[in-house]
Image: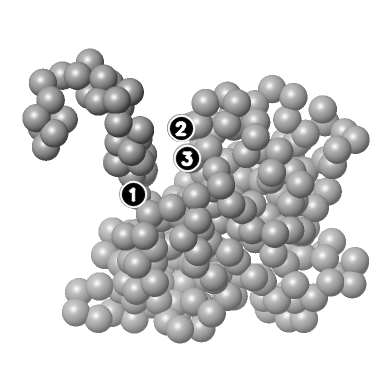
Amino acid sequence: MERLGLGDASAYRARLEADPAEWAALDSLCRITISRFLRDRAVWDALVREVLPTLARAALARGDRELGAWSAGCASGEEPYGLSIAWELALQPHFPDLAFRIVASDADEAVLRRAGRACYAAGSLRELPASWREAAFEEREGSFCLRGGFRERVELRCEDVRVRQPEGPLDLVLCRNLAFTYFDARAQCEFLGRVAERLRPGGALVIGRHERLPEGARFAPWPGAPCVFRGCGAEACA
């Protein structure tokens, strides 16, 4: 408002009504770009202990050789790279014949550039186990940069989740502190419908610690895994 020379919120609202292009500028200012590795540790512990092994066993039982995951609203990459680190250091030794592909999308080009560099301040790594930090990062001029092998399974895309989503089928979708916090009820339902179309029956959806799914969602809580829901297919959980 200061940059536009407007005195209060009412004046800015009038500007939005008069200039539709201003909505895009406002939208770009409303994105949350703060994250860190293994944020909400109890959720990550459940993913490593229960959810990912279950998904991996199901994939092998189907005869698949790859798990597919989507990190929606990935910001500067801590979430998808955290998945890659967890898979390689904790799970891949138990599933050596299974690959893990992670699509990471965000609408903000600036944070995706940071994700592409994959270098972080020490505070972003404070919840990582020390052994993981040492294995996955090397220190460069005061920053901690992800080693190349952990980056290879992550594909970064500049996409708005309201407009475009990865093609399925997906085994795991993480959408935390985005759609189910900042979207209105209609947009939440539309987005969740697109997730349901892409997620395998029995696949996992992870949401934020303070979020809830819309009423009537075709997802059931994953026992023992906070913030994780199991996709039930179109015929159940309605």
**Residue 202 seen in the figure:** yes
Q: Is 33 placed above or below 128 here? A: above
In the image, taking residue 1 as reference, residue 178 lies left or right, namely right
Look at 59% across and 52% down and name the residue there: 164
| 148 and 185: which is toward the camera | 185
Residue placed farthest to the top in the image? 10
Residue 151 location (% of width, % of height): 49, 76
Where residue 9 sits in the image (x, y, percent)? 21, 19
Location of mark 1 (residue): 34
Q: Residues within 10 Å of mark 2 (few under 14, many from 20)?
A: few
Foreground mark, 2 or 3, reads 2
Give the CA distance from mark 1 to mark 2: 15 Å
Which residue is at the far front? 18
Q: Secondary structure at mark 1?
A: loop
Task: Examine the rendering and report whether any part of residue 225 can be seen.
Answer: no
Whole-angstrom CA distance, mark 3 to mark 1, is 11 Å
